[in-house]
Amino acid sequence: QVQLVESGGGLVQPGGSLRLSCAASGNKFSISVMGWYRQAPGKQRDLVARITSGGSTHYADSVKGRFTISRDNAKNTLFLQMNNLKIEDTAVYYCNTWPTFPGRTAWGQGTQVTVSS
């Protein structure tokens, strides 16, 4: 079972930037498709971006051009650079493998991102 620890969230003004990190345990990180997900209050958890082991990326339309997902396989770490943040980006952000399976996928504690003036 991979353990995931997210960090880097915080309070930022609209237009600001944050960089999230996810430290993963285990020996399967480098071969796994990894994703960043987010869950706003009262909403379901959605995929924000994903990246293959080789570095191919996919983004949700709402974050294209503003967010960049990357990974360091040598350090078992996943990143999400978030620029030009909007109020609607406010959510708890989680990392995990992709895809996820309801009722079977374990989640970390996430990191809170709050965009507010």
Image (cartoon, rainbow, N blue to C red):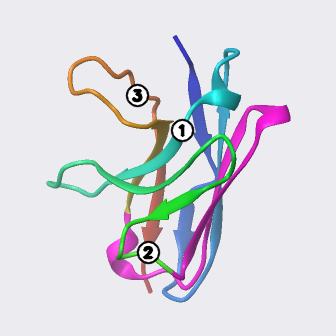
- Camera-side residue of 42 and 22: 22
Q: Residues within 10 Å of mark 1 (few under 14, many from 20)?
A: some
- Amino acid at circle 2: Val
Residue at 70%, 15% (x, y): give it.
27
Q: CA distance from mark 3 to mark 2?
A: 22 Å
Left or right: where 93 falls relative to 4? left
Q: Read off the residue under disc 3.
A: 107
Q: Residues within 10 Å of mark 3 (few under 14, many from 20)?
A: some
Which numbered disc, 3 or 1, marks the residue closer to the eye?
1
Q: CA distance from mark 1 to mark 2?
A: 19 Å
Picture disc at residue 63? 2
Q: CA distance from mark 3 to mark 1?
A: 15 Å
| Tag 1 secondary structure | loop
- Picture quarter containing residue 99? top left
Q: Read off the residue under disc 1.
A: 33
- Amino acid at circle 1: Val
| Tag 3 secondary structure | loop
Residue contact at pointers 3 and 2, CB within 8 angstroms = no
